[in-house]
């Protein structure tokens, strides 16, 4: 009886110790919070397992309309570093980010490259297009900037960050070239991409494809009947074969364009769904930066070729 008791005590002590140990280990890692999944992916590729990296916006979430939740504020308060996109992508979070920057390291990744490479947008007075992740060469600059800022803050991990960034940047260079070759498979006259909102200007500039969105660069802006008529006329005149919906934007506006074109006698098909401002589900290929763009490129090429 005594022996059984002892074993029970021993097992209890073991589990108590083990669970305490694993909890401690988990919380030992400093936390980095990012706004979008794309930024979290870039940070993870630099820091690997040295930090816990969490993004506030999951799959299908629209960053233009996203408002800071109470749980986000708590998470950001716990974080040692906060990375966001900047260029007004997270328009409704700017006050919260501004406040946090008084006591925390808050970094806008879009500050990490020569600002002349930002695309200015006349429809958005005095501002620039925030969708910088769609030019892989610009994203390489972002990865290098994240590495640089992390090395400054954590010099003890300088070499690890350097090594990780070199490996990832090489992968991105190869990927960039792959996109270029894939897009070239679409004949030049058919190389026009129509989406609900103007998220793909950087993609268009980088990979030589014309892009048109119905809604402007932010989903917060409204589109009028005139925008719709103009886009429908353009599609019919150019005999564009397909249009695309986006995972983080309602498909209603694109469906309306398709109906208008079909009524005008131009059969317009749905080319598929693209990831614009959010990545796909976690633990899928589309839940990574490379996987999300790879999906887009394959969908665009299959829809327009
Ligand atoms: Zn957008």
Image: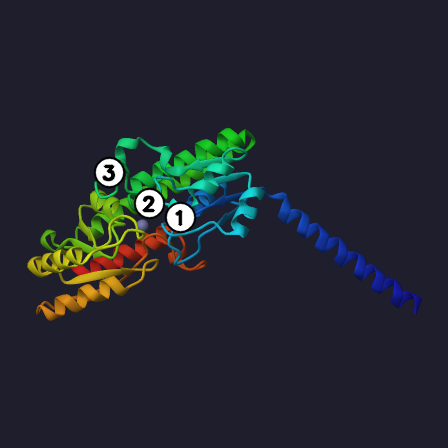
Callout 3 secondary element: loop
- In the rendered view of the protein, which quadrant contains the N terminus? bottom right
Write down the quadrant of residue 125 in the picture: top left
Q: Are the residues at dot 1 and dot 3 in contact (C-beta closer than 8 Å)?
A: no
Measure the alpha-carbon separation of dots 1 and 2.
8 Å
Residue 211: x and y in percent read 19, 50
| Residue closest to the eye, 299 or 111 | 111
139 sits to left or right of 240: right
Residue at 36% across / 40% down in the picture?
170
253 sits to left or right of 281: left
190 sits to left or right of 42: left
Callout 2 secondary element: helix
Callout 1 secondary element: helix
| Residue closest to the eye, 178 or 103 | 103
Whether residue 180 appears in this view of the structure is yes
User: Closer to the N terminus: mark 2 or mark 3?
Assistant: 3
Q: Which residue is mark 2?
A: 133
Q: Which residue is mark 3?
A: 120
Q: Which residue is mark 1?
A: 38
Mark 1 Cα within 10 Å, few/some/many (few <14, many 20+)?
A: many
Up the image or down, 249 lies above or below 55; here it is below
Q: Are the residues at dot 1 and dot 2 in contact (C-beta closer than 8 Å)?
A: yes
Residue 301: x and y in percent read 21, 58
Write down the quadrant of residue 238 in the picture: bottom left
């Amino acid at each position: 009886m005594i022996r059984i008791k002892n074993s029970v005590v021993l097992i209890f002590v073991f589990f108590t110790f083990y669970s305490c140990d694993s909890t401690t280990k988990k919380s030992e890692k400093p936390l980095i919070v990012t706004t979008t999944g794309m930024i979290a992916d870039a940070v993870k590729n630099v820091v690997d397992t040295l930090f816990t990296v969490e993004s506030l916006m999951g799959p299908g979430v629209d960053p233009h309309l996203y408002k800071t939740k109470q749980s986000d504020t708590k998470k950001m308060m716990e974080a040692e570093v906060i990375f966001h996109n900047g260029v007004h992508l997270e328009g409704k979070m700017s006050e919260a980010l501004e406040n946090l920057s008084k006591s925390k390291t808050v970094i806008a990744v879009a500050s990490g490259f020569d600002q002349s490479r930002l695309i200015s947008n006349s429809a958005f007075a005095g501002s620039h297009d925030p969708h910088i992740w769609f030019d892989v060469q610009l994203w390489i600059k972002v990865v290098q900037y994240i590495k640089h800022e992390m090395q400054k803050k954590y010099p003890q991990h300088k070499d690890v960050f350097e090594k990780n960034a070199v490996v990832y940047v090489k992968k991105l260079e190869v990927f960039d070239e792959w996109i270029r070759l894939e897009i070239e498979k679409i004949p030049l006259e058919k190389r026009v991409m129509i989406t609900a909102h103007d998220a793909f200007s950087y993609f268009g500039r980088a990979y030589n494809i014309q892009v048109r969105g119905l809604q402007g660069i932010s989903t917060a802006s409204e589109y009028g009947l005139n925008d719709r008529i103009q886009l429908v006329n353009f599609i019919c005149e150019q005999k564009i074969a397909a249009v695309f919906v986006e995972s983080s934007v309602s498909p209603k506006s694109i469906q309306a364009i398709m109906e208008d074109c079909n009524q005008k006698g131009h059969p317009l098909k749905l080319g598929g769904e693209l990831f614009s401002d959010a990545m796909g589900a976690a633990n899928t290929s589309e839940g990574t930066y490379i996987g999300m763009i790879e999906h887009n490129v394959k969908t665009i090429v299959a829809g327009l070729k």
